[in-house]
Amino acid sequence: MQLHDVFPSNYLKAPDLRGRDVTVAIADAKIEKLGDDRKLVIYFQGKEKGLVTNKTNASRIAMLYGDDTDGWIGKEITLYADWVDFQGKTVEAIRIKPPPQREPSQPQYSERRSSGVTTITRERPQNVQPSMGNAPGAPAHGPNDLDDPIPFAPEWR
């Protein structure tokens, strides 16, 4: 039995991911009072638990979708667990990276003619996000990841 199963949290923790990379769509971003602090909490479409963000994770989302949290609604991110240094200890924490790149089913080409020469080039798809790198051993993702049961839904009910 795991302690996080006995004492569940309203907020997402690294063990909730169960070692998986999970792609989610942002439903809301709001400031909540946690103890004496005010924190940005991100909620996800179809999920119960929110993610209390730190500066690193908020900055990663902002790098993808801009500084205005209202512009994050409906956008996808991928959550994964990573080892970080926190108050002199190494602990497991949730980190954020861009969602898996989804290439269009048909490559897009453009054709340009100049001086009797035809040049055909493949255009970069519009929906490709910048990469911040992949976590070691990260599994491949399919287009239906948002339909998969997310491991951080409470199982103790």
Image (tube, rainbow, N blue to C red):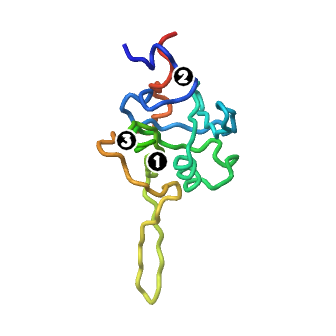
Q: Residue furthest bottom?
A: 115
Residue at 41%, 28% in the rendered image: 15
Q: Residues within 10 Å of mark 2 (few under 14, many from 20)?
A: few
The residue that label 3 is drawn on is 83
- Which sits in the foreground, 94 or 76? 94
Which of 41 and 45 lies nearest the eye of the viewer? 41
Quadrant of the rendered structure where residue 75 is? top right
Marking on residue 97: 1
Residue 125 on image: x %, y %: 48, 59
Q: Amino acid at mark 3?
A: Trp
Amino acid beneath label 2: Ser
Q: Is residue 92 left or right of residue 152?
A: left
- The residue drawn where x is 64% and y is 40% is 40
- For the residues labelled 3 and 2, the Cα–Cα distance comes to 20 Å
Tell me the residue that label 2 is attached to: 9
Left/right of residue 101 with respect to residue 62 in the rendered view? left
Please, is residue 155 above or below residue 61 in the view? above
Q: Earlier in the sequence, mark 1 or mark 3?
A: 3
Question: Is 61 drawn above or below residue 157 in the view shown?
Answer: below
